[in-house]
Image: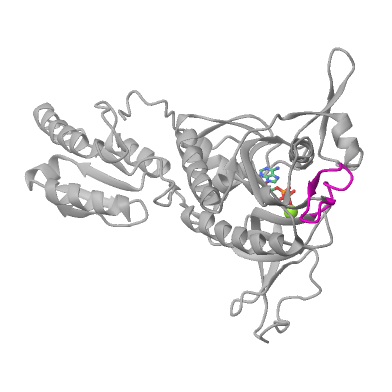
Amino acid sequence: MLQSKAFIKTKKEAPKDEVSVNAQLLMRGGYIDKLTSGMYSFLPLGFIVLKKIERIIREEMNAIGGQEMLMPALQPKELWEEAGRWDSMDVLYKLKDQQGREFGLGPTHEEVITDIMRKRTISYKDLPLYLYQMQTKFRDELRSKSGLLRGREFIMKDMYSFHASEEDRKKYYEIAKKAYGKVFRRCGLTTIAVEASGGSFSKEVSHEFQTPTESGEDLVIHCEKCGWAKNMEVADKKAGDPCPLCGNILTEAKSIEVGNIFTLGTRFSSPMNAVFTDKDGSAKPMIMGCYGMGLSRILGTVVEVNHDDRGILWPRELAPFDVHIVPLVSKDEKITKQVFVEAEKIYHALQETMTVLYDDRDSVSAGEKFADADLIGAYQRIVISEKTLKERKIELKKRDEEKATLMTAQQGIKAVRVAAKK
Ligand code: ATP
Ligand code: MG
C-alpha cells in the first residue's frame, strides 16, 4: 500500500478528552475515530487489525466444531420477558418503534439463539451443536472511559452450545477453554483463566480470561506456580495468603477480562421451552453453555500491553503490515531519486507475498517518517537512505528492536520473509 494514498492521518498529540492509552495511541495512529464516549469507528488501518482478530477467532472456533451465523441486534421485548431479563438487565438499551412496539438492542444473544432452537425439531442425534457469531453488541455502560476496552457499542464473538447431557457440556467446556487460550496466544496476549461465579446466569462455574496489566479494571488473585486463580470480587483470599492448591504465595494483579465462558444449563431452555427428544422419546430442555469474547476489547488490550512512548508494537499475527518500507529524502535530489528507486524495487519484491506499507512520500522529513512508523507499528521496518545507499545496503529492524541491522537488499528481503511467517 502506498502511504501517500492510504487514509492514515496520524496525529502528534492525543485528544485531550481521551484518557485511555489504547484509544490515545489508536486515534493518533489513524486506527480509530471517536464519535463520542464508548463509540468508535474503525478506520481502514483499525479495520485491517480487527479482521485479523476475527480471522484468528473464526479459525479456532471452526476447529472446535463451531458453525458461524448472524443474528439481529434488534430484539423484541416479549422474547426478553420470556427469559425474565427485560427488567433485570440494567445495560439493555430499550427503544420503541413508530407503532409503539418495544425492542431491546442486543447486549448478548441467549434469547434469540434459544428461540431459533425451540422452533426446530431437535433429536438427541442432532446434538451437540455449537453456533457462533461475530457481531455488534450494545450495552448502556455507565463508565466508558477505557477506549475500546468498554464500548457502549462493541464487537463480540458469542458462541452457544447445545447438549443432550450435562456430561457432554462439561467435556466441551474444557475444549472451549483450550481454544480460548489459543486465540489469545495468537493475539499476543497472556491470559490467566480465572474461576468466577456464574454472574447473572448461573451458580455453576464460569471462567474469565484475564490479561494482567495496570490499566485493567478487574483485580485477580492467582498462583504463579500452579495456575489457581480467582477474581477478587468473589475470592476469600488475599495477596500473601498460601495457594489453596499448592501452598505457594498468592499474588494480586490488575487485569482486563478479554473473554468469558459460562455454564448455562437450562437457564434459558427451560423457561423458553427449547427441548430435544431424548433416546427414550421424552422431551427434555437442551443443556447449554455460552462463550463470549470481545474483538474490540482484544484489540484495545493488545495496545495496552504492547506499546512504548512512541507508539504501538503489534504482535506478528495482528500487525496491519508485515513490513514498512521507509525511504528517506536526501538534500541531493539525484540521491533521493536513487533511494526511492531502490525502495520501490524492494516494495515490488515483497508485496506479492506479504502486506507492505511503502512510505512513498517525498516531501516528508526523516523525523516525521520515523515518528509515523513507530506510531503505526508495522511488524518490521526497512530504511533506505543516502547513508545505506553508499554502502549498497538497507537497514532492517523489528518494531520492538532498538537497533537496526545493516544488510544487503537481498538479505533483507529474505530476512523479512522469514520473520513474517514465524
Ligand atoms: P465486564 O465484566 O467487563 O463488564 P462482562 O462480564 O459483562 O464484561 P460478557 O457479558 O461475558 O462480559 O461478554 C463477553 C465478552 O465481551 C467479555 O469477556 C469482553 O471481552 C467483551 N465485552 C463485554 N462488555 C464489553 C464492552 N462494554 N466493551 C467491549 N467489550 C466488552
Ligand atoms: Mg465479567
Q: Quadrant of residue 239?
A: bottom right
Task: Please identify the quadrant where the N terminus is shown.
Answer: top left
Is 107 in the magenta?
no
Compared across the picture, whether 354 is left or right of 30 comes to left
The answer to whether one can see residue 419 in this image is: yes
Q: Residue at x 82, y 36 (%)?
A: 92
Question: Could you say which is closer to the camera, residue 212 or residue 170?
Answer: 170
Q: Residue at x 32, y 37 (%)?
A: 369
Q: Residue at x 64, y 55 (%)?
A: 256
Compared across the picture, whether 334 is left or right of 263 comes to left
Residue 327 percent coordinates (x, y): 22, 36
Question: Could you say which is closer to the camera, residue 201 or residue 380?
Answer: 201
Q: Residue at x 79, y 58 (%)?
A: 198
Q: Is residue 360 above or below residue 402?
A: above
Q: How many marks are shown on the rendered structure?
A: 0
Is 281 in the magenta?
yes
Furthest residue in direction front, as rendered: 280
Compared across the picture, whether 277 is left or right of 70 comes to right
Residue 238 percent coordinates (x, y): 75, 75
Compared across the picture, whether 93 is left or right of 415 comes to right
Q: Quadrant of residue 351?
A: top left
Furthest residue in direction top, as rendered: 98
The answer to whether one can see residue 292 in this image is: no
Q: Magenta span: helix, strand or loop, mainly? A: loop
Q: Which residues are magenta?
A: 265-283
Residue 405 percent coordinates (x, y): 21, 55
Residue 103 percent coordinates (x, y): 83, 26
